Amino acid sequence: MFSAARWRLTAVFTGILAVILVIAGVVVYFTTSSLIYSRVDAELADKANSQMFLLDDHHGPGGGPGQGQDEDDAPQFDPGGYFYAIVDPTGNVSESSYGFDTGWVVSQGTIDEALKNGTAIADVSTEGGESQRAYVVASRSDSGDQLLLEIGRSVKPEQDDLSQLRNILLIVIALSAVPAVAGGYVLSGRVLRPIKSAVDSQRAFIADASHELRTPVAVVRTNAELLERRMASGKIGQSESDAMAVGDILAETERLGKMVSQMLTLAQADAGQSPMVRTDVDLDEVSLEVVRSLRAIADARGVALSVENGEAVWVHGDRDRLREVIVTVVDNAVKYTPSGGRVEVRVARRHRRAVITVSDTGAGIPAESLPHIFERFYRVDKARSRDEGGTGLGLAIARHIVHAHGGDIRIESAPGKGTTVTIELRLLHHEQPEAPPLPDAAR
């Protein structure tokens, strides 16, 4: 799918670039052509102005050199690559330079334009001959007759230059096709890379979610079938296994509900729709509250849980979401710390940042697992996590919440040396009133 899309994007990119190059080439060609012919027209105008004496010396019809007029009496015309002709308003030539071709006489429309505006410019040529550029000036002879002086020259050098320019532009456009295709292929790959990554992540998420949902669904189904058979036999509620089946169903449905809620949170995060109710939050107060709520669990496992802080630390954020982050991190620390160990929570200010650290004396996390610890459904100890009701989504959600608050979360750990989770958030700069102290039992 992505390969076909990549080639389609490459074709579109190449096509757009080709159109741009063609348009640029056309603009360059016609701009250059206009400048070249403007220069030719200026040269012809200067030449015509310098040769106006040809009309002053004109003695009426009779022909110039090459047409029966005595060369000694003919006007002195300096050709220099130019030709001239004197024509009447009907287009008849009365005098011309040597070698003048009658096919070079401008059209009647050009003559009328010159008679009306004083000057006119036209391209003339004989069949199979070179193109000539002619400049026509209208005037009157000494006898009062209205005459026109036509001065022109070949434009073959300019046409050769334009032809060479046209060939160069065509070659440039043709040679641009290869790098355009290569560049389009590379750029389309970069454009599609985040999309492909997102789709791959979504596929992996769906696959992992399906795998995780399969186990609780199977447990619920099995226990429900057991209860159904016992109900059919009329022995429902008469066995200890019935109570266990009901307990398993309730436990797994609770786990399913929690997993669905977490997946909804992540789906909202992916869509950029996570609602946040931001207020000024005292992290010291929230941490004390979390420790107090989890202390019973820690005591049951034989883990010492404590919190340390010397002053109120305020941030601006969603209190419930930040509490969820701290609960996730502290709960994980308690679960993975063996009996007799300890978990310490510290809240402090550091370099204008609010910092929460949760340290434990647990077994630690292998180095190869640390890069994946925030991935969805990832577990270091898959069997143990499932037995304890973990979904593998808690840390992924915690990272999303922290990042949504403009903060950062990182984990440092080594096997046998415990784990430290550090959460950094933006610290409020203005003073906040001190929160009312919690009971000492929470500390």
Image (spheres, helix red, strand yellow):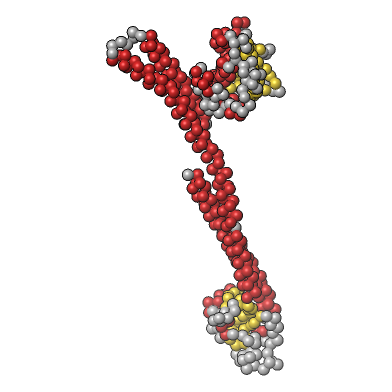
In the rendering, at what x and y percent does residue 57 appear? 67, 87
Q: Residue at x 43, y 21 (%)?
A: 216
Q: Residue at x 52, y 34 (%)?
A: 201
Q: Quadrant of residue 310?
A: top right
- Determine if residue 224 is in view: yes
Residue 13, compared with residue 93, is above or below; it is above
Q: Residue at x 68, y 92 (%)?
A: 71
- Give whichever of 112, 422 is nearer the camera: 422
Residue 174, compared with residue 387, is above or below; it is below
Residue 86, compared with residue 296, is above or below; it is below
- Give whichever of 436, 396 is nearer the camera: 396
- Give whichever of 439, 176 is nearer the camera: 176
In the rendering, at what x and y percent does residue 123 appear? 58, 76
Q: Quadrant of residue 99?
A: bottom right
Q: Residue at x 57, y 44 (%)?
A: 190
In the rendering, at what x and y percent does residue 322 appear? 57, 20
- Determine if residue 118 is in view: no
Q: How many marks?
A: 0
Q: Is residue 224 left or right of residue 276?
A: left
Q: Quadrant of residue 371?
A: top right
Residue 68, compared with residue 179, is above or below; it is below
In the rendering, at what x and y percent does residue 206 appear? 47, 31
- Give whichever of 413, 315 is nearer the camera: 413
In the rendered image, the quadrant that contains the C terminus is top right
